[in-house]
Image (tube, rainbow, N blue to C red):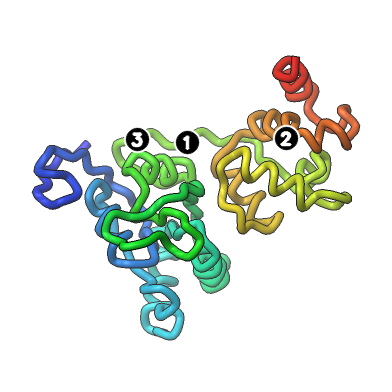
Amino acid sequence: MCVMMQNDKLSGGKEVEMYSVKEVIIVEGKYDKHKLSGFVDATIIETKGFGFFSDKEKVELIRRLAEKRGVIILTDSDGAGFVIRNKLKGILNGCNVKNAYIPDIFGKEKRKAKPSKEGKLGVEGMPPDVLLDALVKCGATIDNLPPREKKTEITKTDLFKTGLTGREGSRERRADLLKKLALPERMTSNALLDVLNVLYTKEEFFNAAACLPCTQNRLPQEEISPEASDRARRQDG
């Protein structure tokens, strides 16, 4: 683990542990990059909002880096952040892309006079431990941390079984789950599946789904993991 002295505003002159990340990290703006640079040793590229997509040379550079080292997309949790993320995923289709997600936390960054349009903190407003956790959970290759163990993936069938897709009220159930797990509210079912596999084990997912009031009331309990159903009943009791 590399320990460096940082004398900028981020660290206040204190020793900061630097984590070396192999993948290239893509963020939206310079303040996001500055925040990450305070504790992450990596190549960090800004999209500068939507301006990136009209820069063909930069797009080609990202493709080459993705093929060589892999990339991590780390955008804000608001609507614009998801549009940028989806555009990047389209551009980098077939490349080694990992998605890091920050939680929905409402507030205002210190440098801003007022909150953003949706009132959510962006990457720059997240504590370093939250950002590091997001990188770890997405499977970032971090030199001084062990790799994550492979796990059984959550599938589209699991979303259907728990009433999160393909049924009356599925949209409302997804909204309940997103709120319960403090996940960004702007997610399609496909995006939700991606995020769930980054952040949770299959058991944790079934447990959370079983605890949703609308799931317990409207779905046959045999369609949910028995262990998760038992936990939900114990919590209700």
Identify the amino acid type marked 3.
Leu
Residue name at image x 27 percent, y 49 percent: 40
Residue name at image x 85 percent, y 52 percent: 166
Locate residue 160, reporting x and y percent.
82, 45
Depth check: 121 or 39 in front?
121
Above or below, 127 against 211 in this view is below
Quote the CA–CA distance across marks 2 and 3.
Answer: 31 Å
Q: Which mark is residue 209?
A: 2
Q: Quadrant of residue 68?
A: bottom left
Quote the CA–CA distance across marks 3 and 1.
Answer: 9 Å
Q: Which residue is mark 3?
A: 145
Identify the amino acid type marked 1.
Arg
Quarter of the picture holding the C terminus: top right
Q: Is residue 119 left or right of residue 25?
A: right
Label 2: which secondary element: helix
Q: Quadrant of residue 37?
A: bottom left
Locate residue 80, reporting x and y percent.
51, 68
* Label 1 Cα crowd, 10 Å radius (few <14 / some 14-19 / many 20+): few
Residue name at image x 40 percent, y 59 percent: 115
Locate residue 102, reporting x and y percent.
47, 49
Above or below, 189 against 232 in this view is below
